[in-house]
Image: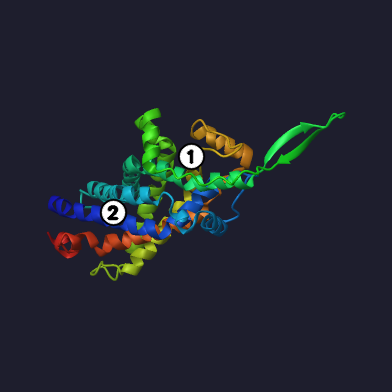
Amino acid sequence: MAQQQQISLPAKLINGGIAGMVGVTCVFPIDLAKTRLQNQRSGQQLYKSMVDCLIKTVKSEGYFGMYRGAAVNLTLVTPEKAIKLAANDFFRHQLSKDGGRLTVFKEMLAGCCAGMCQVIVTTPMEMLKIQLQDAGRLAAQQRVMPSVVTTLKMGGTSAVLSRSYNTTPAPQVMRVSAIQITKELLRTKGVTGLYRGLGATLMRDIPFSVVYFPLFAHLHQLGQRSSEDPSVPFYWSFMSGCLAGCIAAVSVSPCDVVKTRLQSIKKGANEETYNGVVDCIRKILIKEGPGAFLKGASCRALVIAPLFGIAQVVYFVGVGEFLLEYTPSNIFSA
């Protein structure tokens, strides 16, 4: 078994990286819409839905505007997905050393440990990505939201609200790079600046992994041809990853909203700031109601489902083993 781990771990890291890059490329525009929908407040809604957000983004920022922040994800998703998938396999292996079948509790424990490991990369990745994704929303808000000026009517006691429209050229989307944001955060906040929202990220990723990995393992097992032939068709791996990812994503969507709000450094007009997870939850409940915690939930499900479906197909097809000139059969027979 030690040899199996020694040979297969590099392949699993390659599988996780390739799966992450392919998945991010396919679903990133939907993830951008999710971030912008989660960050807009009641009464300042620029986007009515995911489709409306994407259409307006293309009109104002061009096609590649939908991929703002994708470079950060493509750079860091390889170690992030590699850590997540490899850590889950590692902990499952450690918990099954007695030779017995893993119980649901042990599967959930392995997923929990994997979720804790991945935040090392996930938190700074999400932090930088959100700043880049939300820049277009903030610029659009400045263009369409008129400033409200309060004036007093002469000779009267009532206040009259008059709208003052800005006649200067519409502000452009700030072209800030991830490197610039990183340098500024390191200069002003140190390394801890890149880990803003760590608690909320843990609050999201640990339950996600606890739900996803055991659920996927059981769904995947249902596709086995027979007890003598435990192999599973690739399409079943894809469907199992999609369904497990969708359910897990929706279940932790409120945590994702809190994380997104906490990690957004720049705020739009009249948008409140938050002092931690509890303060964020309290203010959202008071000002926007419980429904605000489900903002972008459908977008997140559409992002996570194919992302993990693709990941599991790459993982179980054995692309990494092929690239390392090993086949899955040779690895497991070693």
Residue 16 at x, y percent in the picture: 29, 54
The residue wearing badge 2 is 17
Q: Amino acid at mark 2?
A: Gly
- Give the structural element (helix, strand or loop) at label 2: helix
- Give the structural element (helix, strand or loop) at label 1: loop
Q: Amino acid at mark 1?
A: Ser
Give 59 or 31, whichever is nearer the viewer: 59
Give 48 or 83, whichever is nearer the viewer: 48
**Residue 98 visible within the image:** yes
State yes or no: discs 1 and 2 in contact (Cβ < 8 Å): no
Tell me: residue 120, above or below residue 154.
below
**Disc 1 from disc 2: Cα separation:** 26 Å
**Residue 189 visible within the image:** no
Residue 28 at x, y percent in the picture: 43, 55
Asked whether, in this view, residue 141 is left or right of residue 307, the answer is right
Mark 1 and mark 2 lie on one chain; the one further toward the N terminus is 2
| Residue name at image x 33 percent, y 42 percent | 121
Residue lying furthest right: 155
The disc at residue 264 is 1
| Residue name at image x 40 percent, y 45 percent | 205
